[in-house]
Image (cartoon, rainbow, N blue to C red):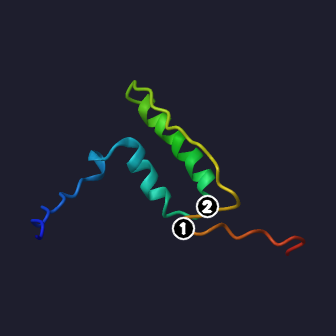
Amino acid sequence: MESAPRPAVRQRSKSQLPVYTRTLLPRLKSVGRITDIARDVRREVRELAASVAHVQTPAYYDEVVGDFCPAGCEAKAVAGGA
């Protein structure tokens, strides 16, 4: 027995997304470590929420071992480079 096709999911505009989601998604496309991205997103969300008299501080738990960079890591400086 086959299930009925699922209705198409309506696309949301960026303003309809939660503050955390619309802050995080573009950052995942930028170069950098996930630990730095998470901390930056947490700070930005707190600032955005505070701008409308709301308190929101996303939790951040880090058990990452090594570097994880969703869009690639920054080039490391070469020691003694020109």
Q: Which of the two residues, 39 or 51, is positioned nearer the viewer here?
A: 39
| In the displayed structure image, the side of residue 79 where residue 63 appears, left or right | left
Quarter occupied by the N terminus:
bottom left
Neighbor class of circle 2 (other Cα within 10 Å; few <14, some 14-19, many 20+) is some
Residue at the (67%, 62%) spot, across then down: 67
Position of residue 52 measured from the top left corner of the image (x, y, whole percent): 37, 28
Secondary structure at badge 1 equals loop
Q: Work out how far the residue at label 2 is from the one at label 1, CA to CA, in angstroms.
A: 7 Å
Residue at the (18%, 57%) spot, across then down: 10
Kind of residue at badge 1: Ala
Q: Residue furthest right?
A: 80
Quarter occupied by the C terminus:
bottom right
| In the displayed structure image, the side of residue 27 where residue 1 appears, left or right | left
Q: Which residue is mark 2?
A: 32
Position of residue 5 measured from the top left corner of the image (x, y, whole percent): 11, 67
Neighbor class of circle 1 (other Cα within 10 Å; few <14, some 14-19, many 20+) is some
* Cβ atoms at labels 2 and 1 below 8 Å apart: yes
Secondary structure at badge 2 equals loop
